[in-house]
Each structure stands twice: as structure tokens, then as C-alpha cells.
Image: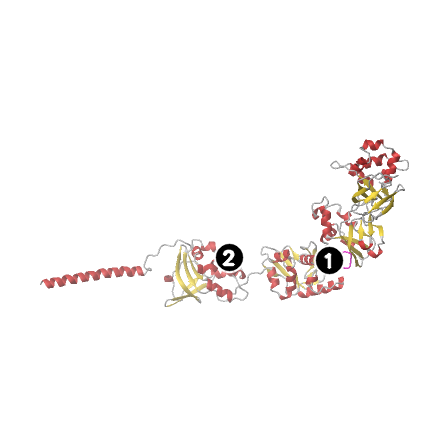
Amino acid sequence: MKKSIFKFKCLFYVLGLFSLSLLLFTACDEDDDNGGMTDPEPTQNIVEIAQGDDRFEILVSAVVAAGLDDDLSGTGPFTVFAPTDAAFEDLLANTDGVDALEDISEESLVQILQYHVAALEATSGDLTDGQSVPTLLSGESVTIGINGSTVTVDNATVIEADIMATNGVIHAIDQILVPEGFEIELAPQTIAEIASETDALSTLVAALGRVPGLIDAAGDESADLTVFAPTNDAFAALLETLTTATGDTYASLDDVPDYVLERVLQYHVLAAAKTASELTESEETLEGSSLSINGTTINGSTNVVDGLADIQASNGVVHVIDAVLVPSFILNSLGTVLEPAVFDPEGRFTTLLAAVETAELEGALTDADATLTVFAPTNDAFTAYIDGSDFTDAAALLASELLDEILLYHVLGATVPSSAIGAGPSSAPSLYDNDEGGPGEEIYISNNGADGIFLNGYAQVILPDLEEANGVVHVIDAVLVPPMSSIAEIVVAAASDADSPQFTLLLAALQNADDTEGSLVELLSSEDGTYTVFAPTDQAFIDAGFADVAAIEDADPALLRAVLLYHVVPAPVFSTDLASGAVTTAGGADITVTVADPVTIADLNEASADAEVIDVNILATNGVIHVINQVLLPE
């Protein structure tokens, strides 16, 4: 009996354990249906989840590029069939002309992404085999396939389902979904990209590469340009034309000077994108001059190649043309005295060319009927002149009223090769006429043989005899500045300088000298002759015993006249004309010049010290002044 009771109690205990185990198993089985735990509520929206998952980096970039990130961050609900990076990489690798997302047009990218989104929340449990799910792409749906545990969307396989977000659900897929018959449009290329990928424009690409500003603009997505693009054959024809016209060999683009190439290329670009129908009869180019347009013909002879107008770029429009357009400034220079400056291979005359254009002198210099001599200053010459002047920079010079006068002073109205310049000093009238009706202001020339040819005592001819059909060009190393004042006016102006007066005693001497044979002030103001004046400083007069103006006024007028005429030579003698030896003065007596460092002048008074020349070649309308530090005394 006791054994029976014991067996019954044991059975009851076992059944109790079994029941408890069954309850625990059931509870565990319910938890296993949810991954062993209850899923928490999502806290991120679809975009935020994708941004935090390194499988969707390209997808996120595409969504942002298409401008859909704000939409997919909204309240939804959405279902997103999300292609992985591997899916995007496969699409990029197998689509012609596409290497990156940027190669797909924005419109196509938007449509592709819309085809991956449904405006509803559809978890895996909501999907059925053969179900058609409408997408955000108007009129297009994706088809769901379910085969056992495999779920497909069109031809893509779901590799992870039910990634829950606050505004919907994400299903990761292994392929990009593309609607049937859909063609991916390529993103418009920049002008630079179009040219680079067009074999017939390879010479243009090489040319643009030599002009950084233009190649940058052609590749700038934010630019808005029209480019008339010459073919390779057009550039080849240009090289032949230049070879014939200049007599120099232009075998390749490398032979074309940078200055010419830049202006030619600028002449092919408009600062606004214009299709053929939008072009007007006259269009201003970046070069500054205008194109004449009549239908598909430009400047009367250049034509747009059939079928190659209106090539749309992301930053403008390209029209392919059959010849290179050459601006008139370049074209008209051929065979004229302007050509050596325009086509200088070293680009040494860009400031001169800018000055010629600003002063509108190209017409005179390119006149086929003219006979001219041009003394052409280099860029370095202009820089040195500007640095020593009141002009702040080249722009200030170009804006100056003196520009025309300076340029005309560099031109002779006759062809004068170096072989026609005689030895020693000479002069020739320039085209600059200070008297408005008289002969042009003289350029003083010193032909010192092997030592060179000099102008006005300081500018040296460094490259002579560049001969053209309408004249000759001599390259010089300094800017010639025409005289504006007579010798007397220069002395008066220097004496009146409030900050640093000079020549006050010289002026007093000129004013108080004996005038019975004519006023010396009038003599040195006259344009009837040309003179050289060795002008003593105020200190020189003080050292000679003339302490001040009062002392000059108290001096014997006849003595003053004799002393002053002893400082005047009745001919222009520039520093480059000076030679050691005797020089006869206007007073009839000689002075003795010794050319050394410094140049000295000895007078006839044995008691006086030799004068040193301390400044030279102060040009006047009637001669030249050299400053000396001692008063010269006749016997």
C-alpha cells in the first residue's frame, strides 16, 4: 500500500515537470517567432537607415543627387527596394558611356530611383507571389515573385527583408530595377568633355590646353558658353595660311605664339549659351570683337558643319565649324609693321599691342599703302618706364591721354632700315606733332657702329630690320617719351618746384644776362634751333661765388651772358654722342669733354675744377639738357 502511494506521488511529480516544461517550451517558441525577443520600435527614417548601412553608400549618393532625400525622409509610408552598392557597380560596369553616377542624366536617375519606391508599407508578410506593386514612377509597377524562401522583385532577389523604418520598410535587393524598354540617358557632358571625346576636335583640345583660363571655363559646370569648334582640318588649313602669309614655318600648333592662339580661341567663344536659332547677326566674343553670322555662315566664309550644330553640353552649346575664325586685329597685321609684334614667338610686345588697340592705331599701322618705321618697345621696356613714372601700372598708362602721343612718337613716316642710318648723330621726325601743323617731333639717333644704335641718348635698338610690306620695325629696350617743353620751360618748371626747387640760380642768370644781342630765355625757348645745355645746379653756382639770386642780379650782365653761352652747344648732343675731345660752344670757346665714369668737362679756366655730368638726356622740344655740378668758366 505504501509502495502504491509512493508510485502515484512520483507519477504526479513527473507529470508536473512535464507540464511546466511544456509551458516553457511554448513560451520560448513564441519568442523564437520574433527572433528570440520582441522587436523595438524603429527610430530612424528610411534615409537615415540607409546612411548608416555601408551596403547602401551609392544608393544614398544617388538619392541625394536626384534630390529625393527630403521626400524619403518624409512621413511616408514607403516601401523601398534598395539596391546594394554591388548592384549599382554592376549597372555602371555594364552600361555604355557610364562609369559613375554623374554620367547618368538627372532625369534618368530620378526615374530609376522612383521605380524602386512604392507609396505604401509592404513587409514580406504582405507580399504575395505574382503581386504587382505600383511604384512612384508614373504608370510603372514591379512584380513580386515568391518561390519557397526566395523573394524576387522583377529580376532582382531580396537579400534582406523587412528593415523597418519610422516611415516605411526597406528590402535590400541585389540588382538595379529598370522598367521594361527604359533607356538610360547620359548626363550632358561639359564642352571640354565633348571636345576631348571627339577625334575631329583633338587639335582644338590641344589648343585649349595652352590657354588655362579657357580650358577651365570649358570644363566648368557652372559656365554658360557658346563655342564654335574648328575641326582638325580647319586648324591644319590655318597653319598653311600662316606659313604662306608670314614666310615663317608653322608646322604645328606649337609654332603659333601664345598671344595669337589665345586671341584666336577667345574669338570662338560667346559668354552665353546660344543655339543656332538664337544667334543674332552680330555676336560679341570673349576676344572683344564680334562675329558676323548669317544662318550657318560665320564671317562670310566659315560654315557650321552639317549636322553638328546645337551640340548640347552641361555648360553651353557647341557648333562645329569648318575653318578657324581669326580676329581682324590678328588677320590685318599680316604683312605689316604690326606683324612682328603680334607673331613674336616670345610674346615680348603684349603691352605695345594693347596700347595700339587702345589708341586705335592698328588701322594706320596696317595700311598697305603706308611707308613706316616703328621703334617697338618690349614689355620690359614698358615696365621700366611705368616704374619710373607717375603711372601706377600698365592700365593707368593705357587710360592716359598721353598714350596716343607716346605711340606716335615711336613711328616715322618713312621706311628707314638700319643701313640708311648714317654714322654719328642724326634725327628724324616722328608722327607725333607737338605743334599741330609743324613737322613731327624729332627722334634723335646715334649710330655708334659696333656699339649700337641709340635713340634720344638712352633707348638702344636691340633687334633691327624686321622688314614688312609697309615698312620696317626696330625693337628697342626703352620707351620713347616725346618732349613737351622747351629748354627754358624745363628750367622754369624745375626752379618753381615747391618740393625740390632746382636751377633757380640758372634761371636768374638767364633772366639777368645781357640781352642786347637777344634774350637767352627767348633763345632757349625758340623752336628755330636745337641746343645742348650743360646746366649747373644751384650748388654749382654757389660754389662759383653766386650765393643766391641777389648775387646773380648784382653780377655783370655781360659776364653772365658769356658764362651762360659757354654752357650751350648749338646742336643736340646726347650722352651717346659724347666723345672725348674739344666741343665748341655757342660763345665760340671750346670745352673739353672726357668720356669716362663719370663724364667730365674741363673749361678754359685753369683755376676751376672739372665739372662732372651728374644727369643726362633731359629731352626738350628744342634740344637736350645735361646736368653738371660745376659752373664752366671761359678764359
Amino acid on which the number 1 mark rests in the picture: Asp
* N-terminal-most mark, 1 or 2: 2
Mark 1: few, some, or many residues within 10 Å (few <14, many ≥20)?
some
Nearer-the-camera pick, 575 or 50 = 575
Quadrant of the snapshot with the N terminus: bottom left
- Residue linked to disc 2: 65
Mark 2: few, some, or many residues within 10 Å (few <14, many ≥20)?
some
Q: Does the image show residue 519?
A: no
> In the rendered structure, which segment of residues is drawn in magenta?
334-339
Q: Residue 262's x, y, as percent?
A: 68, 57
Amino acid on which the number 2 mark rests in the picture: Ala
- Residue linked to disc 1: 344
Q: Main secondary structure of the magenta part?
A: loop
- Which residue sits at x=46%, y=64%? 86
Q: Does the image show residue 270?
A: yes
Q: Residue 631's x, y, as percent?
A: 82, 39
Nearer-the-camera pick, 518 or 159 = 518
Mark 1 vs mark 2: give the one in front.
1
**Looking at the image, which residue sits at the far left?**
1
Coloration of the structure image: secondary structure
Q: Residue 382's x, y, as percent?
A: 73, 50
Q: Residue 552's x, y, as percent?
A: 83, 33
- Is 53 on the left-hand or right-hand side of 306? left
Q: Secondary structure at mark 2?
A: helix
- Is 614 on the left-hand or right-hand side of 304? right
Q: Which mark is residue 256?
A: none
For the residues labelled 1 and 2, the Cα–Cα distance comes to 49 Å
Q: Secondary structure at mark 1?
A: loop
State the image quarter where residue 199 is shown: bottom right
